[in-house]
Amino acid sequence: MGTDIAGWFLLVDDQFDGPLGVQPQRAGRIVQELIDVVYSPPAAAAKRRLSAAASGLASLWARQIHGMSASWQRRSAQNWEDFLNAYTGETINRHGGIVPDVDAYLSLRHKAGMENVLIDCAERIGHYELPEAVLTLPEIQMMHNATVQVVNVVQDAFSVAKEEARGDCHNLILVLQHHRKYSREEAIAESRSIVRGHTDEFLHLKSQLPTLFDSVALPLSDREVAYIFVDDLQSQMKACHDWCRHSDRYSRVMSARPDEPTYLEEMRL
């Protein structure tokens, strides 16, 4: 399932690198069809005539929610919705020639990177579910946020040549260069500093978990699941770096205008 989610994401994500990525109304219609999938019962999706992308998502979603609680399903559906809506937001920016400022970009990127969805998937793939009492702890929320930020900034650092070649502003390094007038080296150094700040925070919070769990009298069974979840967060940060470093997705850059496709295959969205 993890491999299928990654494959689905890469194929669909690349569609927005073509003409679709500068057509907000068309993108909005396509995104809404995908959002409808995660808010519909699997049986209902099977009866509708769906695009290839929506049909693939319906299959993934049916497998993703299998055995998970209603509250987890609501949380994951919301994360899918936020992630998918970010495509429309980026398309609006490209269409209008808007370069979001640093705060606006990081807010959009927090949803656009799919990491929130993948963190949910870690629970499903790992056959566990983080108790609500643990998930809502401020320290766990901070570690969750740090993971999302690290993954997104690391991806931006490795993919900057890819976005720059397309004239796409949606990359932290390009945003820093545009709004703060940084050189490329200064923007990379700032990005590195952001990553280091989040990883230092993460490791500090991780070291405080035993004391935190004692203070809230967390049951042993919940602690065991919490430690698995934290290890999954840390593994996702490491895996993102390793994958981006070695993937041809970023090392082989194709130059094209934002309205020209560079994807492998048109998915007929």
Image: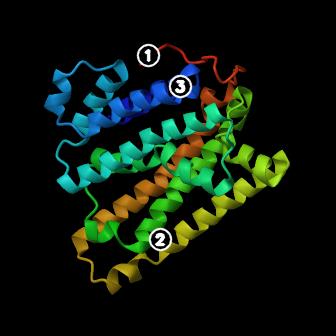
Q: Provide residue 158's location: percent of width, then percent of height.
A: 67, 40
On-image quarter of the N terminus: top left
The residue singled out by tag 1 in the image is 267
On-image quarter of the C terminus: top left
Drawn side of residue 15 relative to residue 220, left or right? right
Q: Amino acid at mark 2?
A: Lys
Secondary structure type for disc 2: helix
| Residue 36 in sight here | yes
Q: Is residue 42 shown above or below 11?
A: below
Q: Quadrant of residue 199?
A: bottom right
Residue at coordinates 66% horizontally, 42% vertically from top-left?
Answer: 171
The residue singled out by tag 3 in the image is 14
Foreground label between 2 and 1:
1
Disc 3 crowd rating (10 Å Cα; few below 14, some 14-19, many 20+) is some
| Residue 69 in sight here | no
The residue singled out by tag 2 in the image is 206
Q: Amino acid at mark 3?
A: Asp
**Which residue, as the protein is rendered here, is positioned at the far bottom?**
215
